[in-house]
Image (tube, helix red, strand yellow):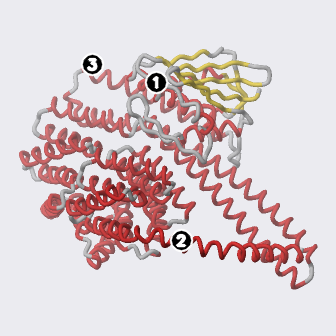
Amino acid sequence: MNYIIFLQKIIILVTLLTIAPHSFISATIDGSKNNSDIGIENDISNLLDSCWHYRTENPHLALDFVNKALTIIDKNNYLKLKPKTLNFLGVVNRKLGNLLNAYNYFKSALNLAEELKDSVQIGYTYNNLTDYYIEKASYSTALENVLMGYQIFRSLNHKIGMAYSLNYLGEIYIQQGDFNKAIKYLEESSVLRFELDDQRGYSNTLVNIGIIYFKQHNFDKAKEYYTKAIKINKSIKYEKGNSYIVALLADIHYYNKDYDNALKSFKFALDFAKKTNDKNGIIEYSNKIGLVYLKLKNLDKAKNSFNLALKLAKEFGHLDEEMFSYLYLSEYYSETKRFETSLSCLNKYIFLKDSIYSNEKLGRFADLQTLFEDQNNQIETKLLKHEIESEKLRNNYLILIFIIVVVAIILLISKYKIQKKSNTILEELNDSKDKFFSILAHDLKNPFQALMGYTDMLSEDFDQFSNDEIKNSIQSLQSISHNVYNLLEGVLEWSRAQTGRMEFNPTNFILAEELNSIIELYKHSADAKEIKLITEVDPTVSLFADRNMIKTILRNLVANGLKFTKSGGSVKIIAQKHKNEVQIIVADTGIGINSKVIPTLFRIDSHHTTKGTNGEEGTGVGLMLCFELVKQHKGKIWAESELGKGSKFIFTIPS
């Protein structure tokens, strides 16, 4: 063993000595050749640094700097810094409220960065797209993008990028109301930003943690974090950050019914937003000023503020603030006894809320979180293996000193095998728990939102409804209640099947009976696109499989079929029983898949994004989840497709 290690070191040393002179000569030649580019790169970098410095306080000046950088790049065909420049253009346009322009710049940056194999800018582009989708209130798509960015930065050990990704993860989970996950990711981000001495980023993360405490009505704790952030912002002269905190403190004044101070603070924040052309701030603070005027019974000013916010929210595509504007206008019209208009605004609010937090999107959100946590577990396992190997190497050196080579190696191998087996079991348990509790919990959320919407309307405006309207509402409540009860019953039945271990739990069940819930889940989406959902499954076909996993697989495949099928088409579910297996097919008449892409659909090291027929966005992570679940059943999954003629996704479950 000693001899082999010694030989390995000698070979490495000789190789390095052989390569070194050539590398030195090559580097000298390359250095001479690239000297002419150094001046160009410095000019571009200086302009981009100025752009980044002014992006918040003076976005118009920042736009001037970044446009000058792009001019130099295009004039000299200097592509190296172009992805970064396009990303900066997107960020500044987003600050100015030009969300469509921002999106187009981010997409151009992503395409060029992928072509140049610039991993850092690919990661930053995914983070920037995350911010874009957060402002568009498309939280599941935001989660897709931030997870892609985080995995890239984590693989590069790029701590600045990781800190941004973790902060965005926290913001997304704040919007979803999952404060435990939000604070976990925000605290991880704050540790990295403190370590990097990123004071502005650290301040922003402290503010987000304060927002969580505010939403939990722990106002003193929220103020504590806001105060820390204010001190940091003053030390770095970050006026925009403190203007935002003034608005957050105004929220606390509002909830404490201190409306005069709330109005004063919101107006200060609005003036600063107008000064910096912060469209999102103008919309949000106009809505909140309207709420204060409503409480102060200054109804005309309240209405004007709400209408201004609504107009700008529609113009710039801020779906969440548009939703809030309709809710606040509903309260205004109720206050002025115009109940029909109030109900109309409330219906628009409910429609927008359903479109943001639909059951399908929440299921997709849960699937993404499951896949992310599964990949994180795999990475942590690899790191643990690396630590074990390092420990083994250190022990080998001790073996040389104490001359007990054979005995020590046997002990180390034995320890390694036992620890590896234990880690594998723990990983499987955690994966199962995280996947299915996450998916089932989100499946329960949407029906309760609908229940609360109906009960709120009945409670607040009961006297304004006709008997027919009341009867229809009660029937809807009855239907939703039955659906929730059935879903809860299924969850409890699945939970009882677990005996302290989250393991693969196959049972016999009739496939056709399980398809009804899948069809019902996507019926609205299919009807909206005039697509037929068809099942051709023999009612006698049964599976011995994990019922929840099979439903998750079918949900993802049917959603894909609907996404890529045009109006008038169809999505068909077929089951065929063979000798030793059941083959399940989800076939659509959609746009099809390029033959070069098909072999990489289920690979974790490949990434493809294709818009649906109505412009739906996606990253293909659902197929990765399907691949994992089919693999647990010892089955196979593959795709067959032809461009323009549709696709078939086929998987098998052994009998």
What SS does tag 1 mark?
loop
Whether tag 1 and tag 2 are in contact, CB under 8 A, the answer is no
Q: Which residue is mark 2?
A: 29
Q: Which residue is mark 1?
A: 565
Whichever of labels 3 and 2 marks the residue nearer the N terminus, that label is 2
Please give the name of the residue rendered at 36% of the width and 53% of the height, measured from the top-left corner.
Answer: 131
From this viewpoint, is residue 225 visible? no
Taking 452 as reference, is 59 left or right? Answer: left
Residue 406, horizontal then vertical, whole percent:
93, 73
Residue 446, by quadrant, is top left
Whether tag 3 and tag 2 are in contact, CB under 8 A, the answer is no
Q: What is the CA distance from the residue labelled 1 to the residue labelled 3? A: 38 Å
Which image quadrant: the C terminus? Answer: top right
Mark in front: 3 vs 2: 2
Q: Residues within 10 Å of mark 2 (few under 14, many from 20)?
A: few
Q: Which residue is mark 3?
A: 468
Whichever of labels 1 and 2 marks the residue nearer the N terminus, that label is 2
Which residue type does callout 3 highlight?
Answer: Asp
Mark in front: 1 vs 2: 2
